[in-house]
Image: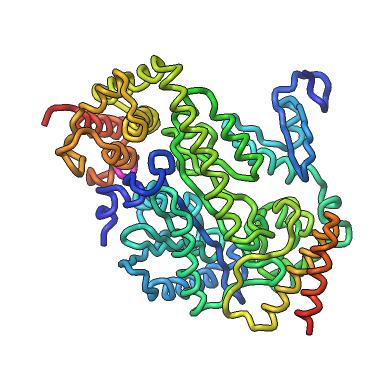
Amino acid sequence: MLCQICNKNDATIHLTEIADGVRAEMHICEHCALEQGIAVKSQIPLNELLSSLLAVQPTDEELFGPSEKGAACPHCGFTLAQFRKEAVLGCPYDYEVFEKPLLNLIKKAHNGKTTHCGKVPSKTSTGTKEQIKLIVLRQQLEDALRSENYERAAKLRDEIKKSQN
Amino acid sequence: MKLTDLSSDINEWFSGSGPLADIVISSRIRLARNLAGYKFLNRCKTAEKAEILKKLRDVLMSLDLGDKVFYISVDKAPVLNRHLLVERHLISRQHAFGKGPRGAVIAQREFFTAMINEEDHLRIQVIRGGLQLSKCAEQINHIDDMIEKKVSYAFSPRYGYLTACPTNLGTAIRVSVMLHLPALKITGQIEKFFNAARDMNLAVRGLFGEGTEAAGDFYQISNQITLGISEADIIDQFKNAVIPEIVEYENAARNQLLSKQIDVLDDKISRAMALLRNAHLISSQEALFLLSHLRLGLNMRDQMGASTPAIDTLCTLSQNDIAADKSRGLSIETINRLFMLTLPAHLQLNYGKPLDATHRDVLRAKIIRSALNQET
């Protein structure tokens, strides 16, 4: 089959992405892969290939939004442009500073999930623990409503009311 | 404690004990943590890195882990020593050859390692032989709690444990199982395994974390998603769904070899025996490849009572030199030992000095020959 980008060469690289139950396929030639900035090594694991594809495709604008482009973290001076290059952040505060632009990335990396529901350090004050519980309950309520499980949603709403008192 | 105390024998968890140890080599759980009030390592200047290193080193060395611990200054260690630590799965390649002040705290029995200043300030791991994820979890949680009594972690209620890379957010846990899947490879079904892993959002790596062509038919499978799911759920998925499914695939492939492709099986094992017992030069890659087939034969005998001409011959080989128990026929433990002791850094550290590639290949072949031959 022919490359879907240039329609000239044979497609030798076949990529499949499964996200949210939707399957998308892409068939391209090595030349276009290079053009797209995808480094194709013969031994690269497929999931790494997919991650680099995901990482390369959207532009800075699409991924991060126009308003955030020049922003720098007041604590460590880190910018999104640097994150693009190095794939790691500068300090924990960056998660707040760049919350909106990072949200998309986090959703993609963690199958749509954006809320922690695992272990919590024992040192957090009771206030924070309660806050976490509420965040989790609210997320579960959202999920229940989305899947039209109204009985569960009602139960969760009650629990949230209780926790807030 | 010197590193040669480590290099002369295999780690406990590689010795072939533990549940499902014929296919599941080891279970590992790693947690990533960063100290509150510090920048991530990417933005730290050397002084800040050194401060973090000292702080965490002091805390870790003061813990009661039920075992002696020692500290290695990774940035100052000789290159060969760093390679050894990587070969023993105690530190990552990234840690061995990274930049800046960094260290590792290692328990003598090697079930626990802490990397300080790798990608995050702290990465702690517990490894056990066979499928023992629950025990790993119990241990690593306990150690995490002990550390947390003495430091404050960077944590947000929304995103959980804050890591340098957003792909590690939340639980910041990496559950990893190392598997030996020679039959799936021989029967051409290894793709099935890759696809299953991919569909479950799992990463598959080779023996030392790279490439799809796994050396020695060893594969490491680990979770990629760390946020929005609890540690317990991730571990449950592995224990109850992922690993049993893969073990089933491999066992089915082994049965297939016995019932439908016995000549292929016998040929692989015979060739492995012939080459390993006679070659005078053998590369690490080739040794792993061939030893894998011997391991398959021995395990098939042990687990399935398999009896084929090649397996029968294999089981009559006695063992020498490096075997722990010389009175038995060739054991899986000896093969496991050969897997590790013939790796490049192990070879050279045990020999006592660096060797070039050719001399390593000669020494490797010698060690294997004497372990597998009847002569004393």
Q: Is residue A26 visible?
A: yes
> Where residue B192 appears, x then y in whole percent?
59, 30
Q: Nearer the viewer, residue B20 or B76?
A: B20
User: Which quadrant does the N terminus of chain B fall into?
Assistant: bottom left
Viewer-nearest residue: A53 or A26:
A26
State the residue lying farthest toward the left. Answer: B376
Magenta stretch: helix, strand or loop mostly: helix
Q: Residue at x 20, y 44 (%)?
A: B324
* Res B284 quadrant in image: top left
The extreme right residue here reads A66
Q: Please say if A54 is above or below B188.
A: below
Residue situated in front as seen by the camera: B127 or B162 = B127
What's the residue at 25%, 55% (across, down)?
B5
Q: Nearer the viewer, residue B233 or B209?
A: B233
Residue numbers of the magenta segment: B342-346
Return the residue found at the far front.
Answer: A151
Q: Is residue B136 above or below residue A74?
A: above
Residue at the limit of the structure toward the top, as seen here: B263
